[in-house]
Image (cartoon, rainbow, N blue to C red):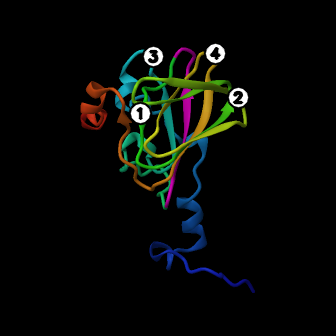
Amino acid sequence: MATARHARSKELESASLEQIMDRYVARYADRRADWAAFEDAKIEGFKRAQHRFIGAGGSGKHNDVSAIPPGNFTLSIMFVPPGQGNAAHTHEVEEVFFVLQGHLDVFVQDEDGRKISKRLGPWECISCPAGVIHGYDNNSLEPVYFQVMLGRAKPETMGYADDELYKRRDGHLKAS
């Protein structure tokens, strides 16, 4: 006999083991590459695809029923072709980039525009603290796959450092 030492969350109190496995397993083959997950992804140089596993990440697409429901964090896999990246931004919570394949140039930046970059390879990561301007670029000749985690179940959409991009940061959510 086994004893659960912690109570199940309210929504899982009466769930069967089969129901739990069905809802809390996500396979890569079932994820759809979302090339419109972020407002800046419409801009050449920032094109990338998000594969949502747990929650919506910073995309704001919190109604994606194919993703595992988030509890206290999100998890996505990003696909970034050569020459692409994302716009400098912040979040209200910590964000982690963990490289799985390829090489990713990550950066932190201050409000005066001073930027410091480091290249990450497979099995290397950066933890971006809340409120610190950061981002990434794929300056290599190969695509990059990396894991992204945000420290909240339903984080706000990205807080772009660029004023014009920030004003329309949820435009991708309003598109048909």
Return the disc, 3 or 2, that comes first in the chain's sequence. 3
User: Which residue lies under the disc numbered 2?
Assistant: 121
Answer yes or no: is residue 168 visible.
no
Q: Which label is found at residue 10?
A: none
Return the disc, 3 or 4, that comes first in the chain's sequence. 3
Mark nearer the viewer, 1 or 4: 1
At numbered mark 4, what does the secondary structure look like: helix, strand or loop? loop
- 20 w.r.t. 99: above or below: below
Three-letter code, disc 2? Gly
Return the disc, 1 or 4, that comes first in the chain's sequence. 1
Q: CA distance from mark 3 to mark 4?
A: 13 Å
Answer yes or no: is residue 128 visible.
yes
Q: CA distance from mark 3 to mark 2?
A: 20 Å
Q: CA distance from mark 1 to mark 4?
A: 22 Å
**Which segment did they paint magenta?**
72-83
Lateral position of residue 137 relative to residue 165, left or right: right
Mark 1 in CB contact with mark 4 (< 8 angstroms): no
Q: CA distance from mark 2 to mark 1?
A: 22 Å
Q: Which label is found at residue 45?
A: 3
Residue 97 located within the stretch drawn in magenta: no
Query: Which residue is drawn at the image coordinates 63% and 26% (left, top)?
Result: 118
Image quarter in which the N terminus is found: bottom right
User: Which residue lies under the disc numbered 1?
Assistant: 89
Residue 77 horizontal/vertical position (percent) = 56, 38
Graded by Cα atoms within 10 Å as few (under 14), some (14 to 19) or many (20 or more), the crowding at tag 2 reads some
At numbered mark 1, what does the secondary structure look like: helix, strand or loop? strand
Q: Which label is found at residue 140?
A: 4
Lateral position of residue 41 relative to residue 23, left or right: left
Q: CA distance from mark 3 to mark 1?
A: 15 Å
